[in-house]
Amino acid sequence: MPGTQSGMLSVTFFTTTTLCYFLAMVSYVVHLVTGKRPVGILADSLAFFGFVLHTAAIGLRWKASYEMGYGHVPLSNLYESLVFFAWTVVLLYGLFEVRYRYRSVGAFVLPVAFLTMAFAQYGAPLVRSAGSLMGSEALGNFSIPAGIQALVPALQSDWLLYHVVTCFLGYAGFAVGAAVSVMYLVRSRKGTRDGRAGGADTADGILSLSPPAEVLDRINYQAILIGFPLLTLGIITGAVWANYAWGSYWSWDPKETWSLIVWFIYAAFLHARLTRGWAGRRAAILSIVGFCATVFCYLGVNLLLPGLHSYGGG
Amino acid sequence: MESGTSSIVMTLWRFFCSLRLTIFLLMGLAAVSIVGTLIPQNAAQEVYGEKYGETVARLFHLLTIDDMYHSWWFYLLLGLLTVNIIACSLRRVRRDWRMIASPVTVLDDDLESSLPYVRAWAAERGVKEVESAASDLLRRDFTAPRVTRSGEEIHLFARKQPLARFGVHALHAGIVVILTGVVIGSLLGFTKAFVEIEEKGATSTAASRSGEPIDLGFTVRCEEFSVSYYDTGAPKEYRSVLSIVDGGKTVIERKPVLVNHPLTYRGITFYQSGYNAAAFLFSVRDRKTGVSTRVDVRAGEKASLPNGDQVVVMDSVDEVRGHAPRYSGPAVHVAVLPVDGSPESFVLMKNHPDVNADRGGVYQLSYGGVSSWNTVLQVARDPGVPVVWGGCVLLVIGFGMTFFMSHRRIWMRIGKERVVMAGCSDRNQSAFLMFFDDVAEALKKASSRADTTSKP
């Protein structure tokens, strides 16, 4: 546990944030199902309050790191990166809500933020038991220490900030895209069950407040349009840093390779968009596939493949 | 005959211009890249044999799957993608250039029907009056329009940020430049070579990954090396102080090289990569006489004690805590080989001289720490790096242009009876549409009778 007072306070804030996101998530779902406006406003307020606490907690953790004499951005291990990822997802969701004015989308995006925060705080035992079931030693010893640790020499660089921030903003774009895509698929399935094609503007009842299918499709595209250049920047800053630290801008390390795989998938998504027939359902599926690859790049690589990146090493 | 070759060329051209090829190549590269992260790369041939069986291992070797990111077929995919990008860009650059250099400034029926946003209303004032009101409005809220007269009608054309069309070309060019830099680096440079220099030592050759010597063309000298730790025992900093001697002259003197802080001279870069102990310091006390002497034991070598006994260091750690949690600091595992008697081995710790003080026979050994370090530096020369960075800059600029700029165009046809306004934007449609409707509304007002506003 982070030793100083700010460190302790930041842990309390993180726990409260997780609770806020959970309540916001539930409220968004209730809002989506019942269509009650006050519930939507409650959901927004909870998410906003959680986000403010979340921001303060990251700031406090940063401060605590200075008080402990390490003095580095809170982006240096798995715990800190998960917390930051959840933050970027909520941030991006907020921007989209302000722009598109559809509250109900939160029912699909907030779960991502909540699950990420919950995983950071309580997920390690789950992975360990999964690991012992699979007989994997790496997973069996998995932990997500919440303590503020000193930086090993390889991470002592300003590029840490640029690299991690750009990567995770990119990931957040893909997360929002995938969440909206799930909503699209749920909605269009409902539409077909009702015996109407496509699901455009046909869903009523349970998803009464869901935005029209075209809007979901557009948000998906927009989110990826934001995520893709940021991922590109993340890969470039990573390459610049690797060139300083390891003497080579690219070494086909599994993490590097997987980030490139993610890049290929979304590049294909954006180009497919220019040809006919790749909007709507197929775009939604590709967006979800892309996000699965992103999650594997972020967590799977460290848990299952050997490499140079420190996240997830515990 | 000639038409036959030209039709082949045309078919090839169409093939390489196709967006389907792009999508296929991107998905293909993603798929094969996954394979390379699941099958270990660059391992010894026996490893594959053990893991997958002899036949599969031979197949892997044949198809270079054991080093697939450098295989001919991976390069082929990248090469095809490059040709695809260049072909698509060439085709589009021509079109975009024409659109920007000689824009269509007259709004005829064909153009009108091809544009997404069209508004029309009845003209209630003279052509001239409407034209000057519209020009003023566009100049104020958009940009100054070009005016074309054709017969009775007047056409206006105004545009903003036409260069936005070239953002996508800049970023595609960036990718081609990056790939060019990669090729330059792999043809003319080397990476992952290393030098190992003891403190106060020097070398002018590096060893390549395969162990071949590489002549540096100058001498690099390690003045000193140090390693420091956090209180927890985790490493904090490795620091080599290097000097470079070229042609008998010291050109770089005592430059510290740390992880993340490399040193470059004549295109060759040295990166702090690792270190190991070159020699260990021991204090050796004769148990009978009480006389102490200082003995330096070099790594991997036997050192003689005054009476002819020998001592050798078998293993060493900088921080023993990981092995023995109750202790801290540097430790060595030594073996003492007496002239007569049987050899014995034991652990000595710098911070805990009492531990095993009774071992070692005639002499009491105490460990004083590492007396000399070897620094291990990675060495690379990659003339492609500046080209790669240039490509990255182009890529980022291209993304910026496509993201923050949009090519917006507005046309107007002002006739005696009707005013038609049309427009389009290459991105950010909703914002453009809002702006377009505002302008249309204002123009509609301006082109209706002036007295409409002063009605009682």
Image (cartoon, coloured by chain):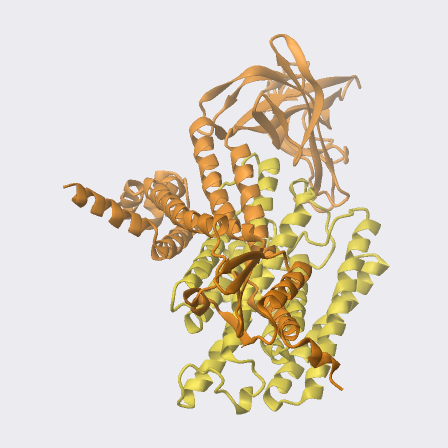
Determine whether, in the image, residue A6 is placed left or right of residue A144.
right
Q: Is residue A78 above or below residue A247?
A: below
The residue at 60%/63% (across/down) is: A172
- Picture quadrant of residue B436: bottom right
Determine whether, in the image, residue B392 is placed left or right of residue B7.
right
Instruction: Judge by depth and name the residue closer to the eye, A143 or A65.
Output: A65
Q: Looking at the picture, how far across and down is residue B428, in whole percent?
A: 57, 64
Instruction: Judge by depth and name the residue closer to the eye, A181 or B173.
Output: B173
Q: Is residue B336 above or below residue B321?
A: above
Determine whether, in the image, residue B95 is placed left or right of residue A141.
left
Q: Looking at the picture, how far across and down is residue A73, in whole percent?
A: 73, 51
Q: Residue furthest left?
A: B1
Rendered yellow, the chain in question is: A
The residue at 48%/67% (across/down) is: A288
- Picture quadrant of residue B135: bottom right
The residue at 62%/91% (across/down) is: A34
Instruction: Judge by depth and name the residue closer to the eye, A81 or B313.
Output: A81
Q: Is residue B343 above or below residue A164?
A: above
Give the color of chain B as drawn: orange
Position of the N terminus of chain B by quadrant: top left
Q: Is residue B175 above or below residue A137?
A: above
